[in-house]
Image: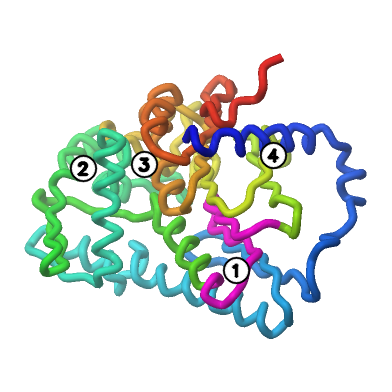
Amino acid sequence: MAGRQPVLLRLVACALAIAATDSAAAASAPPDAAAPAGAWHQREAAIMGTRIAVELWSRTPAEGEAAIDAVMEEMHRVDALMSHYKPESQLSRINAHAAAGPVRVDRELFDLIARSLDFSRLTGGAFDITYASVGYLYDYRHHVKPDEAQIEAHLPSVDWRSLELDPKSSTVRFMKPGMRIDLGGFAKGYAVDRSIELLKARGIEHASVSAGGDTRILGDRFGRPWIVGIRHPDDPKRVILRIPLENIALSTSGDYERYFDENGVRYHHIIDPRTGHSASKVRSATIIGPTATQTDGLSKTAFVVGPEKALEILARIPDIDAVFVGPDGKVYYSPGLAPPTR
């Protein structure tokens, strides 16, 4: 992190200046003057249960539309492989059969599951894809939650150490009955990374690809950074910080994404694997780093361990920075993003 800190401090200074700029003046700023012949192209779609947004610069409309088509196709491909909603996906096949014996999967999926165990070790189990052993009992759309007896019955199956992976045969096996896995914690980030690599291979040099709260940025806006805002947990129109970024990934997780409130309690989709309940030690967590797979996986950690412990964990990882909003509204920054003191 130390190697990148001066750059981030420069970016934060720019962000504070941008935040102080009148919005009308910002809207009247000149277009990308240094841009070569060509144009920006944008498209949105609903894939992987979330909003997919692509913006890129291309020399011709045909080149731009073909590149966006490739991104959308890749999003559908990853979704078909890793969705736990689709009964024909390889992930669903794991959940249906891995308790009875090893299930062979494509190497791509195997490697991503293996990557999840790296996150589990790094975070002391705060990140655990077997949380789904309890998590599947929640239905946020229909305001359904498990009772304490159901949580107690299913919680023993939440144990990342009981995932048996055989790299030689590319198989996954559950060592406990009732286990399930869910890659929602970083599959979208992985899809974003895959999309950026596809754009690079096509010669695209300036782009932004988002899947829900996960974004990766390629290049800049011809001498100007991409401006990414972090929303307030209680107000989608209010921004707590604007960050100028280029060639980097950013993921934000919040308790306002998939949730319902009941009797003064918010039940949301980020589950504490130790308790089976919605984690509540932060309201929002934003991670900035080299890849969206990494930032997506790490963005859930603070919800389970709290902002101070999360910052300790992240300090051990190169080129990672973070912004957390606590339950009381207090904002926590990693050293590379801390606003300058006056």
Q: Residue at x 27, y 70 (%)?
A: 90
Q: Amino acid at mark 4?
A: Arg
In the rendered view, would you say 23 is above or below 13?
below
Crowding around mark 4 (Cα neighbors within 10 Å: few <14, some 14 to 19, many 20+) is: many
197 left or right, relative to 63 = left
* Residue 268 seen: yes
Comparing marks 4 and 3, which lies closer to the viewer?
4
Name the side, left or right, on which 159 lies relative to 21: left
Disc 2: which residue = 158
* Amino acid, disc 3: Lys
Q: Give the mark nearest the N terminus, 1 or 2.
A: 1
Which of disc 1 and disc 4 is earlier in sequence?
Answer: 1
Residue drawn 26% across and 33% down?
A: 124
Give the distance between the C-alpha atoms of the residues marked 3 and 2, in whole angstroms. Answer: 17 Å
In magenta, the rendered stretch is 199-220
Q: Nearer the viewer, mark 3 or mark 2?
A: 2
- Under mark 1, the amino acid is Ala
Circle 4 is placed at which residue position? Answer: 242
Which residue does the image show at 15% across and 63% down from the upper left?
Answer: 167
Give the residue number, with chain letter if any, for mark 3. Answer: 145
Instruction: Tell me: residue 90, above or below residue 266.
Output: below
Q: CA distance from mark 4 to mark 2?
A: 37 Å
Extreme residue in the bottom direction = 62
**Front residue of 91 and 22:** 22
Q: CA distance from mark 4 to mark 3?
A: 35 Å
